[in-house]
């Protein structure tokens, strides 16, 4: 009997040990005291990262292909296009839609669902991209331009939805990957996707124009736009099978009253700094295109060149982005996104000052090769720094419950910066007067100086981004809420669940 009792005790001890080991595996603790999600097998963990983030490829493609479409419309319709209001809006109207989408879907991704918001934004993107490709208005050319402009606005809303819903879902999903490469995988399936979208958005019109022998202009631009439907449709199928990120399920405010006053106290200044850095980056990046036009002008005459020549060189120019984003992705894990961003903008500022100072020599037709190489380095540094890391910083410097709105506001302000830049920089160019050299230099004196400002802002005011920053931020925010009387038992509530004890007022503050 004693032997059987001893065996029973040993069995219970073994079971308890196994249970404790299992619990330890399921609930690890980071250095910051925050729980960390268990690491999943790579193949299982990477799928939601791809599904959430890769939709930004469509952003790059659709935003870049419209430049080729505008060039074709100008060639096909001549004076009708030049005198139409659409000429001013077709290329830029998607910015307005994107801002709307970022703000709306930022809210929905926090208060409704990450995955459902992604699905809705994908559907919007597919439908209105297809409609834009088939733009028609009773045979009236000007009416067709206006319809195209309208569809592009709604396309922008779909693109905007990809930013908060997709990027924050991607950031949260990387928490289930092995520590040490989480930032890299986030970048590869967000900013790198945008950059590859830019390249393909330039390359597809080249292929279509070559297939049409630079003729059948309507076919070229409609096909180039229509191909933009293929990728989001494919991604939509993959997104049907992903679930909400674990971090969102545990810390969301989906069924809780969001204490916006406390949120602003805790994150208001940080959000201002992140938004300002994003604004500066997008504002400045629109001045950088002046050098690509200079390079192309030294290679061919755009008034007589074929579409394949124009689109082919446009593809080459866009390839300058790729080395920076691909090589910079692992750097963000090696030294951290904060230092990678500061390093990128600092080096970009130095190269920008050099290019501006040597513009007279570099702009000569005989120096086009050297100019292209230096310009490529300049563009790559921009992607290595803010291009790769500003979205990552926006996605990982706030708590899960408000991450979608935090990211959406920062991204929207960035887009506003891009929109403002398109209007401000022509005036900066005009300040150079009749001097071609000064007109080219002034934008880069401004942009390079703003790069330095961005480096100072991030080094002084923003925290380091570690591998477990998302979990640590959730723990910090939860502690802050509890210290201010907010009942944190509401966080992570699921549909139909209620707080187990006490009563909760409408503002979410525990009263009993």
Image: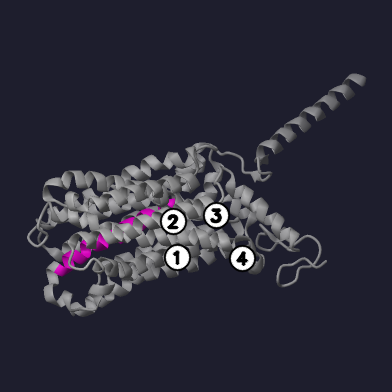
Which residue lies at the image location 23% right of the left edge and 79% below the top edge? 143
Q: Is residue 236 visible?
A: yes
List the residue tagged with mark 3: 461
Image quadrant containing the N terminus = top right
Residue drawn at point x = 27 percent, y = 51 percent: 199
Q: What residue sits right under mark 4 in the picture?
A: 264
Mark closer to the chain start, 1 or 3: 1
Which residue is pictured at 26% across the width and 63% down the height? 66
Q: Could you tell me how far apart the alpha carbons at marks 1 and 3 are, in whole angstroms? A: 21 Å
How far across and how far down the image is residue 389, in percent?
45, 50
Report how many numbered discs are placed on residues in the image.
Answer: 4
Marks 2 and 4, the one that precedes in the sequence:
4
Residue position marked by numbered label 2 in the rendering: 453
Q: Residues within 10 Å of mark 2 (few under 14, many from 20)?
A: some
Which is closer to the viewer, label 1 or label 3? 3
Which one is earlier in the sequence, the residue at label 2 or at label 3?
A: 2
Q: Distance between the residues labelled 4 and 1?
A: 18 Å
Tell me the distance, in whole angstroms, between the alpha carbons under discs 2 and 4. Answer: 24 Å
Which residues lie in the magenta part? 52-74
Does residue 119 appear in the picture of this structure?
no
Q: Residues within 10 Å of mark 3 (few under 14, many from 20)?
A: few
Please state if 366 lies on the left or on the right of 290 as rendered. Answer: left
């Amino acid at each position: 009997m004693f032997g059987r009792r001893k065996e029973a005790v040993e069995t219970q001890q073994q079971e308890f040990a196994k249970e404790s080991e299992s619990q330890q595996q399921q609930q690890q603790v980071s250095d910051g005291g925050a729980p960390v999600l268990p690491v999943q097998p790579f193949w299982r963990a990477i799928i939601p990262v791809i599904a959430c983030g890769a939709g930004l490829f469509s952003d790059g493609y659709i935003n870049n292909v419209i430049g080729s479409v505008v060039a074709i419309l100008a060639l096909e319709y001549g004076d009708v296009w030049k005198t139409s209001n659409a000429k001013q809006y077709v290329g830029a109207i998607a910015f307005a839609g994107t801002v709307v989408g970022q703000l709306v879907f930022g809210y929905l991704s926090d208060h409704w669902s990450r995955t459902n918001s992604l699905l809705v934004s994908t559907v919007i993107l597919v439908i209105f991209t297809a409609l834009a490709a088939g733009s028609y208005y009773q045979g009236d050319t000007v009416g067709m331009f206006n319809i195209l402009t309208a569809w592009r606005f709604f396309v922008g809303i779909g693109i905007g939805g990809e930013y908060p819903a997709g990027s924050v879902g991607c950031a949260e999903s990387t928490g289930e990957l092995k520590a040490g490469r989480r930032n890299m995988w986030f970048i590869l399936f967000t900013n790198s996707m945008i950059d590859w979208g830019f390249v393909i958005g330039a390359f597809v019109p080249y292929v279509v124009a070559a297939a049409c022998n630079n003729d059948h202009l309507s076919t070229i631009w409609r096909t180039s736009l229509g191909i933009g439907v293929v990728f989001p449709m494919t991604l939509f199928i993959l997104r049907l099978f992903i679930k909400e990120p674990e971090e969102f399920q545990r810390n969301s405010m989906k069924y809780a009253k969001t204490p916006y006053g406390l949120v602003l106290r805790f994150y208001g200044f940080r959000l201002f700094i992140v938004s300002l850095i994003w604004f500066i980056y997008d504002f400045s990046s629109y001045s950088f295109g002046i050098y690509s036009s200079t390079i192309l002008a030294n290679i061919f005459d755009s008034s007589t060149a074929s579409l394949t020549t124009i689109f082919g060189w446009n593809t080459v120019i866009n390839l300058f982005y790729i080395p920076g984003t691909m090589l910079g992705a692992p750097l963000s894990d090696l030294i951290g996104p904060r230092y990678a961003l500061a390093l990128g903008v600092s080096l970009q500022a130095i190269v920008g000052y050099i290019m501006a100072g040597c513009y007279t020599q570099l702009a000569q037709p005989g120096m086009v090769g050297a100019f292209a190489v230096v310009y490529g380095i300049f563009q790559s540094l921009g992607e290595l720094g803010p291009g790769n890391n500003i979205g990552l910083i926006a996605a990982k410097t706030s708590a899960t419950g408000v991450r979608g709105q935090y990211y959406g506001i920062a991204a929207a302000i960035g887009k506003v910066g891009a929109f403002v830049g398109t209007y401000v920089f022509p005036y900066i160019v005009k300040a150079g007067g009749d001097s071609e050299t000064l007109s080219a230099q002034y934008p880069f004196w401004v942009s390079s100086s703003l790069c330095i400002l961005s480096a100072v802002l991030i080094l002084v005011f923003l925290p380091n981004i570690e591998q477990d920053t998302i979990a640590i931020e959730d723990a910090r925010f939860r502690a802050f809420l509890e210290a201010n009387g907010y009942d944190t038992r509401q966080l992570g509530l699921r549909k139909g669940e209620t707080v187990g004890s006490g009563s909760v007022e409408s503002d979410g503050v525990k009263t009993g």
